[in-house]
Image (tube, grey):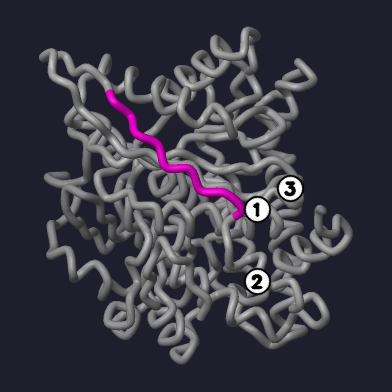
Amino acid sequence: MPNLSFVSPTRNSPWGTYLSQIDAVEPYLGKLARWVETLRRPKRALIVDIPIELDNGSIAHFEGYRVQHSLTRGPGKGGVRYHPDVTLEEVMALSAWMTIKNAAVNLPYGGAKGGIRLDPKALSLKELEKVTRRYTSEIGIIIGPQQDIPAPDVNTNGQIMAWMMDTYSMNTGATATGVVTGKPIALGGSLGRVQATGRGVFVIGREAMRRLHIDMEGARIAVQGFGNVGSIAAKLFAANGAKVVAVQDHTGTILNESGFDMQNLLDHVAATGGVGGFKGGDAIANDDFWKVKSDVLIPAALEGQINKERAEGLQTRLVLEGANGPTTPDGDAVLADRGIVVVPDVIANSGGVTVSYFEWVQDFSSFFWTEDEINVRLDKIITGAFKHIWDTSEIHRTSLRTAAFVVACTRVLEARVERGLYP
């Protein structure tokens, strides 16, 4: 397995997981396999120091990253996450998955990702603004509306994007709304963007359930992670007749065999910050979440959640990857052996980047669409992409993950061949 000198991935680490996925797809690439090594190496990785003065007058330093995995098919596109466990290797993997995701959906983007190693809850709003603006200034040499377009990710939101856009614009001397997506509506954001990733998980889940002959009415749904992605997906599944029976987040795990009252649960989370303590369900041990019987399991938290041991105990028919990289290679192998269908992250959670693309297009044209128009366009694009991936999996008799990588890697490498090498 090829390695880079500045990371030492294991098989189930984020970058190791990605490399394993490339290894799996290589036999299906034909003559394009000659170029596959370009997928195993990020084009550019930037590490930046972010010094700020804290509210108490002391100086703190934070480490930030922006990785551009591939720019072959267009500008880099990918989020920025703020988390105490962010590492260069993780950001590399996330940027590579963005390359695959954008190509799988056939968006005109390459893949990129960013992050800062910090706990945003430990900073005041003013300190968070300082960190964001200094980070933006440091990575400003490689981002831009036609170069690399950041977006929200874990622990970042529209306010963070507004600060990034303003900082970039001030440094370049002109308002550049297209430098980021996921912005507030007042600054050129798109209607439907906040709900887009969760809505995409539901739409793809609906399509997969139809092909697997799983009735939506009464279907049992289990959701890990109840943030923007998990909560929206859960709400849409419940609104269409399914029962959300188990939910887990950082505050605990709750179970209701009859299905949660979603509005009451959402109100509780808005008031308390998590599902823990919700009276409309029973608290269970966190490890027991992975043993709950369900028709659809949605891991919508962080990567590496479904490992070999958890995969062996899952009682579900369909896994919808709302998070990026939630299943390790060893877990994937177990699920395949057990006949549990996995819809991979690169298509299951592609709704967010698809509506980010809509936002970027609207910013360039200064013409904005209604939310209904956004949702119709989103549904059409991702259902078409899913059909192509499903058909590819049947042609090659592979998993949906391998099929998604076949589709995406073929598009990236065909573009690489056409562009050639410079000089």
Badge 3 or badge 1: first in the primary sequence: 1
Image quadrant of residue 193?
top right
Badge 3 or badge 2: first in the primary sequence: 2
- Disc 3 is placed on an element classified as loop
Residue 49 falls inside the magenta stretch: yes
Badge 1 or badge 2: first in the primary sequence: 2
Q: Is residue 419 left or right of residue 238?
A: right
Kind of residue at disc 3: Leu
Q: CA distance from mark 1 to mark 2?
A: 12 Å
- Point 19% across, 70% down: residue: 288
Relative to 368, is 113 above or below? Answer: below
Q: Is residue 337 left or right of residue 268?
A: right
Q: Position of residue 340 (x, y in %)?
A: 47, 81
Instruction: Give the camera-side residue of 3 and 255.
Output: 3
Name the front one of labels 3 and 2: 2
Q: Give the labeled residue for mark 3.
A: 107
CA neighbours of label 2 inside 10 A, class few (<14), some (14 to 19), many (20+)? few
CA neighbours of label 3 inside 10 A, class few (<14), some (14 to 19), many (20+)? some
Q: CA distance from mark 3 to mark 1?
A: 13 Å
Q: Which residues are magenta?
A: 43-51
Instruction: Give the camera-side residue of 365 and 275.
Output: 365
CA neighbours of label 1 inside 10 A, class few (<14), some (14 to 19), many (20+)? many
- Disc 2 is placed on an element classified as helix
- Point 77% across, 84% down: residue: 395
State the mark number for residue 70: 1
Q: Position of residue 401 (x, y in %)?
A: 59, 73
Q: Position of residue 44 (x, y in %)?
A: 57, 49
The answer to whether residue 225 is visible is: yes
Relative to 131, is 243 above or below? Answer: below
**Residue sticking out furthest to the right:** 418
Residue 362 falls inside the magenta stretch: no
Q: Position of residue 237 (x, y in %)?
A: 48, 52
